[in-house]
Image (cartoon, coloured by chain):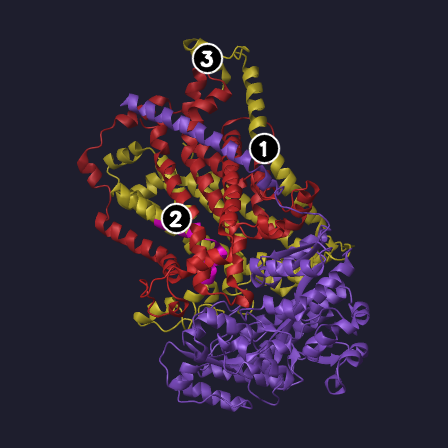
Amino acid sequence: MTDSHLTRRTLLRYGAYGAGAAALAGTAASWDRLTGADIPGRDDGSLVVATLGPAYGPEAIRTLTEGFKKVHPDIKLRINAVQATDWSDFFAKILTQIAAGTAPDLVYVATEGVQLFAQRLGVALDAWVKRDAAELREYFADVHPSLVESMMYEGSLYQLPVEFNAADMYLNSQVLKRAGAGFPAADWTRDDFTELLRDMKKSSGSQFTPYFWTNRLWGGVVPWLFANGTNLLTESKAPGGAWLWDGFYPSAARQGRGGGFRWTTPQATDARVEESYDYLASLIQEGLCTRPEGGNGQNLIGVFSTGRVGVTPAGGFWAGGLHLAGMEPGSFDVQYFPRWRTQRMQYGAAGYSLLRTSKKQDEAWEFIKFAARRDTLMRLFETNQTTPARRSMLTADRYRESGPRHWQVFYDTLDKFPDTGPIPAPPQVAEVEQVLLKHTGTALSSRRSVGPALRRMQSDLEKAMERDV
Amino acid sequence: MSRVSPLSQATLKTSPAPLSVSRARHSLAPWARIAGLAACALLTLGPVIWTVSTSLRTPAESFDLPPKIIPTHPTVDSYRGVFDQIDVWLLALNSTLVTALIAVGQMITAGLAGYAFARLDFRFKKSLFALVLATMMVPLQVTIVPVFLVLKSMSLTDTLLGLIIPAFPTAFGTFLMRQYFLGMPKDLGEAAMLDGAGPWRTFRSVYAPLATPGLAIVGVLAFNYHWNEFFRPLILETSGQNYTLPLGLVSLQGNLGTGSISVVLAGVVLSMIPAVAVFLVGQRPLREGITSAGVNR
Amino acid sequence: MTNTQMPAVRPSRPATTPATGAAQPSARDRGTRLLATLFLAPTIVGIVVFTVVPIVGSVVLSLFHWNVIDSPRWAGAANYREVFTDSTVLVSFRNTLVFMVLAVALQLLIALVLALAVNGRMPMWLRSVFRSAFFFPLVLSAASISVVMKYLFNQDFGVVNWVLGQVGIAPVPWLTSEHSAMAAVILVYVWQQFGFSFLLFVGGLNNIPKEIHEAASLDGATGLRKHLHVTLPLLSPTLLVATVVGVINALQVFEQPYVLTDGGPGDSTRTVVMVIYESAFEQLRFGEASAVGVLLFVLIMAVTALQFRLSRRFVHYQ
């Protein structure tokens, strides 16, 4: 016994030596991988663009890199897809790079961050826009002025929007049919909406809730505030911007445009805000609506596509998402958000922000223009994972395979309702959002808690808005 | 301090263990105990089973209630989707390199330092140990910016080495190994010393072989932790070629969370395979370490 | 130990004595010190460079206002004052302590009971299966599994409420009520983490010589009594590791509440590390985030020191 034992131990020992040697050899062989020496063209003075990873897969990166190379063979381009799960992850990455002095030249920024970047980090594009006006005329003619205005801050333009998503209402056709309800009219009211939810509830089993929504800035409670003719913060327009409107838009489209939005005084205790919360609380109480969950709505597509939910707010990005989730084109459709006092709707948009620290600002501008070109966006947005900012790209052909039937709703949300606006996103947006989500969660736990929660929200918002970013 | 001679061990060892006594050892009937364990195991694995089975279903079936554990139309499309959408092999290579090197490195540093803290006498022992422990108490989110700056000064940002080297010292591993060495009978080392062995030989031939189970735990846990690590790679790695698997998997979630849940879960399942394998391999030393080391031989 | 005893037995193995004349106690001590230095060097150097320096950096940062973009401005104690008056920060400390106590207690209890049960008599393969099962959740990434759990715990469509419904329990608003959200976060956390303590206990039980158990059985100790009086004291070093590490980890909980509830509803599941993350990377207040970090560090240190102090009474080394 002792003998076999010893042999086994000896074997084990030699095995361990062998493994150790193999590990050493392996490490040596992969030295270039460990040090990144095998990555071609690193730190070679390329123009660096940071994008959001989940939106820009390897395919999209190839499309952008190769496409740009054809147009500008002299400019070396490097796209870093930051694999962030959400905006704060993305921000953590960019901020660390800024702190270390290794910031990218361009950063993909959504409405949430437009004013923060404009105020602290970005360069206004005005001079370049004016210089290349002739070249850009076609772009602006194709993009709704509201989207452009949402990228302005204090009279200057900071980004060219390439995509947007408005909060429209998605309806599950199967659930509609079960409830014996028709597709709602474009001018349906809040009461029509409530009735529809009741019909859906009556005709469905217990594993069903008619209206599902996520507690977030985009598509949460804010669209209801918009529909009720109010907002979380008072909204006004900065002066200026005429240089852009006069240069690129016909007089009808110029109407009421300014130098970008200003969101200033909190008004959470405003009667209409309270009314909106009361309405949602009553829906929850009646069992017509889920309690709002925090987070980014990752399960939303799942519960909607499987008919566990009848109605939910989402944007053009859901056309691709529902298709991917296996929904047939006819099994869902989209309509405007219902009318209350107004039918103003809410959206978020995104584009590239040019950082002040960039030493290649002219090259960066070339990329901004390239990224907003129609052919670039056509290749980039093949699967309807978002709504293109260019009106001409929304065609029956684009939505043939995925649906929905009323795909025109996506862009008409802007065209038919020109006052449709961006989510309120002042430079202090992060705190504003946190305060909103926090108190929305408690406000809707019962109808009685609406008032007190909104009062707390108001005082927290006031504190947040006072703070220097 | 107790001075149990090797002889007392021998007395224990020689005590007979008649069958009848062994059988009476547990007041709980063995079958009830095993049934209880089985129920707990099922509860523990439930969410994992749901994850695996959902990754094998079409997205449309994903959220059925009652949950369909056995998919009616099993499909591996989701797995194909993972391979189509991301470069699994490169990501897995990076993850393997990073994780394996960290695990080996931690076993070495923790084994050595743990032994020093447990069995060697030197100045400032207590304060140094407190220092090591203290490093466990600082959340990564607080120090990540300074860490990034330190790595930048060493030109290690955006390299895999930049992920590996800072992870070599392990407070937890050191702590664990210290406890392990402390838990070993002291008289073994004393006997060796009496036999004339120096400090190195005492470590090398008496204690080190006994440390296998502890080292296995350190290695397995290091592998697990760093295999799933997200925040550090997110901040440190910029080039797509340096991404690790958890970073790559984020792509599957799609723009604004529109990715297919089945594909996302297929990615999760794929990524857990190596960690499971490491655990299964590591179980052997965990179990056998003590017997082969010869404490109760 | 006293060195004077050694020479008495030494002659039995003269050959193994190092040539340096280690018969001198001082030489042996020198050897020990040299060995200690060599053994500690990798750990200590690494810790100083990659942890101590950054920590000092954070402490310094906590005395400044810094938004990363502009250069830091001196703040003195302003960040700390701010922290102590900010209700969100204070609530997050309370939440974290509540979470720590409940999660660690639950985690240790489950792990201990299961480790003892697994250690009982059963076929080898079965033991192996159980061990792997209990360890399994640890293999998953906390963030991905939290996404799955978020679905399972959904009030209206989740599997958890469906199962409860089968036995007649009304749907629980797990993630959307201030009363149950913390419970859900604790359950998900413990589900994933207990395997860690379990593994430690299994290893610790392995380290207890079988003979001691058998001797105890001979003395007539059975079942619970044997575990209380024989197993637990022998397991106490491992228990200390599991508790200390469990507490340190629990005080830094982040992923589960971040994904499951985003700290809500209200602030009911907002933890200290969430506050740090939010104020640093969402609100660009790195000075304040560092101040909260320093306070958390002090809290963890205090709790850990307390445990070691208490452990002197309860932990027995062989």
Chief secondary structure of the magenta portion = helix
Which residue type carries mark 1? Pro
Q: Do discs 2 and 3 share a chain?
A: yes
What residue is drawn where x is 54% and y is 17%?
C28
What residue is disc 3 on?
A: C16
Give the vertical position of B7 relative to A138 (above or below). above
| Residue type at the position of mark 2 | Phe
What residue does disc 2 label?
C135
Subunit under mark 3: C
Horizontal arrangement in the rendering, residue A464 relative to residue B17 (left or right): right
Depicted B161 relative to depicted C92: above or below: above
State which chain disc 2 sits on.
C
Q: Are marks 2 and 1 on the same chain?
A: yes
Q: Circle 1 is placed at which residue position? A: C42
The answer to whether residue C2 is left or right of residue C80 is: left
What shade has chain A been given?
Answer: purple
Decide if residue A239 is in sight here.
no
Residue at x 48% of width, y 57% of height: B84
Mark 2 or 3, closer to the camera: 2
Q: Earlier in the sequence, mark 3 or mark 1?
A: 3
Q: Chain of mark 1?
A: C
Magenta segment includes C144: yes
Sequence-wise first label, 2 or 3: 3
